[in-house]
Image: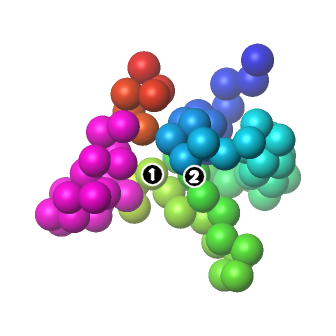
Amino acid sequence: MATDYAFIRAYGKFTGARESFVDDTVRRARRQNAADDVMIYHEDSASWTHFGDLEAKAEGGDAEAAEQVKKIREIMR
């Protein structure tokens, strides 16, 4: 089992995404040499959301983001 792009895989589990969707997203990240902490690709803007972005929102007081960070970290253990 591949272990690269752990944040994409953890976010996929968090959202209940199909394994094929997660695999496609990991392949895209590989092709684009995306950073290791990417977790969501946005087709409309052709950009990635990084786990660090979510952590920053959580640290800024966003309770929903803080809960997502907590759950994703639990999945990754």
**Above or below, comparing residue 71 to residue 1 in the picture:** below
Against 7, residue 38 (above or below) is below
- The residue that appears at 75% across and 23% down in the rendered structure is 2
Q: Is residue 18 shown above or below 63?
A: above
What's the CA distance linking mark 1 and mark 2? 6 Å
The kind of residue tagged 1 is Phe
Residue 3 position within the rendered picture, expressed as x and y whole percent measured from the top left: 67, 25
Quadrant of image for the N terminus: top right
Instruction: Establish if 31 lies above or below 76.
Output: below
Q: Are marks 1 and 2 in contact (CB under 8 Å)?
A: yes
Tell me the quarter of the picture where residue 9 sits.
Answer: top right
Q: Residues within 10 Å of mark 1 (few under 14, many from 20)?
A: some
> Was residue 25 drawn as part of the magenta stretch in this picture?
no
Q: Residue tagged by mark 2?
A: 38
Q: Position of residue 28 (x, y in %)?
A: 81, 54
Q: Which residues are magenta?
A: 54-71
Can residue 44 be seen here?
Answer: yes
Which residue: 66% across, 63% down? 41
Report x, y in % for residue 37: 53, 46
Residue at left offset 57%, top offset 52%: 38
Q: Quadrant of residue 6?
A: top right
Front position in the image: 64 or 28: 64
On the rendered structure, is 35 left or right of 57?
right
Element under label 2?
strand
From the image, which quarter does the C terminus lie in? top left
